[in-house]
Image (cartoon, grey):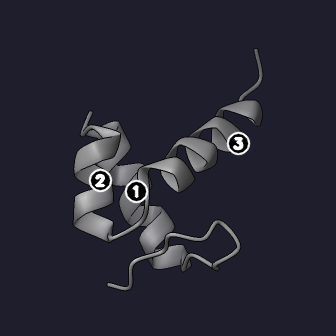
């Protein structure tokens, strides 16, 4: 997979689905970054954005 270092890159839905599965499996962001080739910084931002949509 491509290495997405820039947060302006578009991440495919397939990769987002993989990230979700890995997160549910309690895989660390560092490991997810290695598996997907996406920067940890982007992953942190992505995860934070996802949690903003969860109702309290």
Which residue appears at 43% of the width and 59% of the height?
39
Q: Earlier in the sequence, mark 2 or mark 1?
A: 1
Residue 27 or 29: which is nearer the viewer? Answer: 29
- Residue 29: image x %, image y %? 34, 42
SS class, disc 3: helix
From the viewer's perspective, tell me whether residue 53 is left or right of residue 39: right
Which residue appears at 65% of the width and 32% of the height?
51
The answer to whether marks 2 and 1 mark residues whose Cβ atoms lie closer than 8 Å is yes
Quarter holding the C terminus is top right
Residue 32 or 13: which is nearer the viewer? Answer: 32
Tag on residue 32? 2
Depicted 54 relative to depicted 37: above or below = above
SS class, disc 2: helix
Mark 1 neighbour class, 10 Å CA radius: few under 14, some 14 to 19, many 20 or more: many
Depicted 40 relative to depicted 47: above or below = below
From the viewer's perspective, tell me whether residue 30 is left or right of residue 9: left
Tag on residue 54? none
| Label 2 – label 1 distance at C-alpha | 7 Å
Mark 2 neighbour class, 10 Å CA radius: few under 14, some 14 to 19, many 20 or more: many
Label 3: which residue? 49
SS class, disc 1: helix
Depicted 38 relative to depicted 32: above or below = below
The answer to whether marks 1 and 3 mark residues whose Cβ atoms lie closer than 8 Å is no
Label 1: which residue? 19
Q: Earlier in the sequence, mark 1 or mark 3?
A: 1
- Residue 2: image x %, image y %? 38, 85
- Residue 22: image x %, image y %? 30, 49
| Label 1 – label 3 distance at C-alpha | 13 Å
Depicted 21 relative to depicted 28: above or below = below
């Amino acid at each position: 997979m491509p290495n997405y270092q820039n947060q302006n890159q578009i991440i495919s839905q397939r990769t987002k689905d993989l990230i979700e599965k890995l997160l549910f499996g309690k895989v660390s962001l560092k490991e997810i970054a290695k598996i997907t080739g996406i920067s940890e910084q982007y992953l942190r931002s992505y995860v934070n954005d996802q949690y903003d949509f969860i109702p309290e």
